[in-house]
Amino acid sequence: MARKREYAWYLEPLGDIAYSNEIIAKNIRNYEVGSQDILCADGKRHNLWRCLSAEIFKIDSSRANFGERFRIRIFCQEGGGQIRNVTKWYRRKKGKPSHARF
């Protein structure tokens, strides 16, 4: 039987950092103070908040409601692997079917 993959999800506040941190803190259930200077797969250090994937979905899908000052990047870590920026993957839009029937 295949082992279940475990993922850790993170948010990086951008834009108005103080405002973005406040929004994240108010919207995650398992409140953890953001981790400072975490080395990620891109070779850079980031300040990240660890949270559940459902919380990321809720925050990311509501980001228009928080205004232009609120911006985030989404990171993911599979098992004990490197933490990677998955913002583009997470937000990709589903294409239309190639043979749409009307």
Image: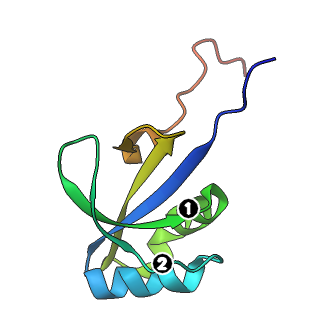
Q: In the picture shown, does residue 48 fall above or below 45?
A: below
Where residue 61 appears, as percent x and y from the top left, is 55, 62
Q: In the picture shown, does residue 36 fall above or below 93?
A: below
Q: What is the quadrant of residue 29 in the picture?
A: bottom right
Query: Given the image, on which type of amino acid does mark 1 rest?
Result: Ile
Picture residue at 48% right of the left edge, 78% below the top: 24
> Is 25 left or right of 97, judged from the image as shown?
left
> Is 8 left or right of 100, judged from the image as shown?
left
Number of residues whose C-alpha sits closer than 10 Å to that of mark 2, classed few (under 14), some (14–19) or many (20 or more): many
Q: Nearer the viewer, residue 30 or 81?
A: 81
Number of residues whose C-alpha sits closer than 10 Å to that of mark 1, classed few (under 14), some (14–19) or many (20 or more): many
> Is 3 left or right of 51, judged from the image as shown?
right
Q: Mark 1 points at which residue?
A: 56
Q: Do the residues labelled 2 and 1 touch (CB within 8 Å)?
A: no
Where residue 5 appears, as percent x and y from the top left, is 65, 34
Q: Nearer the viewer, residue 34 or 68?
A: 34
Q: Which of 27 and 81 is in front in this view?
A: 81
Picture residue at 27% right of the left edge, 80% below the top: 17
Q: How far apart are marks 2 and 1 (CA)?
A: 9 Å
Q: In which quarter of the image is the C terminus?
A: top right
Q: State the SS at label 2.
A: helix
Which sits earlier in the primary sequence, circle 2 or circle 1?
2
Where residue 76 appears, as percent x and y from the top left, is 46, 47
Query: Given the image, on which type of amino acid does mark 2 rest?
Result: Ile
State the residue lying farthest toward the left. 44
Q: Which of 26 and 77 is in front in this view?
A: 77
Q: Name the residue under label 2.
A: 24
Picture residue at 30% right of the left edge, 87% below the top: 18
